[in-house]
Amino acid sequence: MTWVPVPDGSDFPIENLPYGMFTTGDREPSLGVAVGQQVVDVSALSRAGAFPDVADGVLATLDRLMAAGRPVWSAVRRELTTLLTDEAARPRVEPAMVPQADVTMLLPFAVGDYVDFYSSIEHATNIGRLFRPDAEPLTPNWRHLPIGYHGRAGTVVVSGTSIARPAGQRRGADGGPPVFGPSMRLDIEAEVGFVVGTPSPLGQPVPTAAAKEHVFGLVLVNDWSARDIQAWEYQPLGPFLGKSFATTISPWVVPLAALAGARVPAPVQDPQPLPYLRCAGDWGLDLRIEVEIGGGVVSRPPFAGMYWTISQQLAHATVNGAALRTGDLFASGTVSGPDRHQRGSLIELSWGGTEPVRLADGSTRTFLEDGDSVTLRARTGRGPRLGFGECTGKITPSGP
């Protein structure tokens, strides 16, 4: 039990201890950990000597902590747990605590590279039926490898950042020439991402068994998508401007270690993947996502059913010798389940715009309108009940 008050149903019990970067406006950005309704200033505690076995400066930023490697991650987590459960440590820690309501959360880490996968078989099937109605919904390679694309790291933003409606080319009406203007089919993608801590050398693949040595933690991801721009541009090289304008992540990074109790067997893969993609142990995660638009929940996607796992995504991304860097962000792709209320994007929920989604205020949406606010939340479905906080963005009109 922690001596810090933790309200019932909090995302941040003592078993969580997610990391983020914050400021209060009168101090330099600091590394913090969330507990209950408080933020513990880890950087301040480090300067005061609370982590004697951790090198100076390591706890100044999350980037430095992630780069320090798994033994340091484990040592810091153990010491934080002790400080927050030992009543005798309270006088040392309380001066370094700030109410969450008084802080401004920053982008938690410097994003190195950004990769977005396509790991939900339900989502891939739905999109295949919508985009290629006269063909098999899954492409021939889908069950053999985790399909993905390289996104734009520089447009990854922290929760709370407004999202300007993107403009671009769209397919012309009735086969005519393309037109340019604001996207009329702006969408969300409810995803979970993982963040690389320990880098790897160029030319050295990372096997599935080594994933735990490199993956620091997980975040919520909303990979905003301009479906009309995407539909016109994606053949033959895939997503580009329809995806690169913004990706929102939650401000808190939940350590992989905190999610041990939520690990479950991944779905059976048929056919069996090639040897480099096979992995031992349970790499599925029972995370239950909520998608809220306009103040009401419109979808509850289940992450446990994702066909391709974190360890397989990491192994595939590096099998050609590509190096990992601290801060690399890998997103799962849209999380969708077999039922309609489990679809993680509006293009699925509205079935390409033909079946409007009713919001809590009685209005309907096929795609996002200016002024719409979207919030993603997620909780563990087993093990200690913990969450990720909010991943929120509000749509503003297209720029000049």
Image (tube, rainbow, N blue to C red):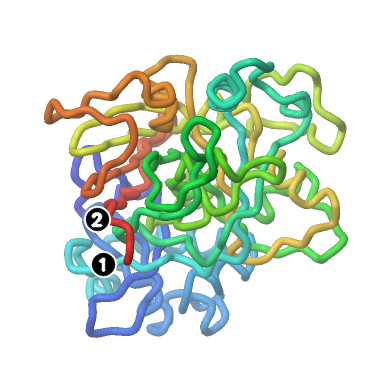
Residue type marked 1 = Arg
Q: Position of residue 21 (x, y in %)?
A: 39, 69
Farthest left residue?
A: 361
Task: Evaluate if marks 1 and 2 touch, with contact meaning CB atoms under 8 Å apart.
Answer: yes
In this view, 326 is above or below 195:
below
Q: Residue at x 81, y 21 (%)?
A: 272
Q: Secondary structure at mark 1?
A: helix
Q: Position of residue 107 (x, y in %)?
A: 41, 66
Q: Is residue 279 left or right of residue 127?
A: right
Q: CA distance from mark 1 to mark 2?
A: 8 Å
Which disc is residue 7 wearing?
none
Q: Residue at x 38, y 42 (%)?
A: 186
Q: Position of residue 92 (x, y in %)?
A: 29, 74
- State which quadrant residue 188 falls in: top left
How many numbered marks are there?
Answer: 2
Quadrant in the picture for the C terminus: bottom left
The reply to whether residue 377 is visible in this rendering is yes
Taking depth in this image into account, of 390 and 31 the one nearest to the observer is 390
- State which quadrant residue 166 falls in: bottom left
Q: Secondary structure at mark 2?
A: loop
Taking depth in this image into account, of 82 and 45 the one nearest to the observer is 45
Mark 1 or mark 2: name the one nearer the start of the chain. 2
Q: Position of residue 362 (x, y in %)?
A: 13, 26
Taking depth in this image into account, of 62 and 274 the one nearest to the observer is 274
Report the residue marked by disc 2: 3
The reply to whether residue 311 is visible in this rendering is no
Q: Residue at x 19, y 52 (%)?
A: 5
Residue type marked 2 = Trp
Q: Is residue 29 left or right of residue 151?
A: left
Report the residue marked by disc 1: 90
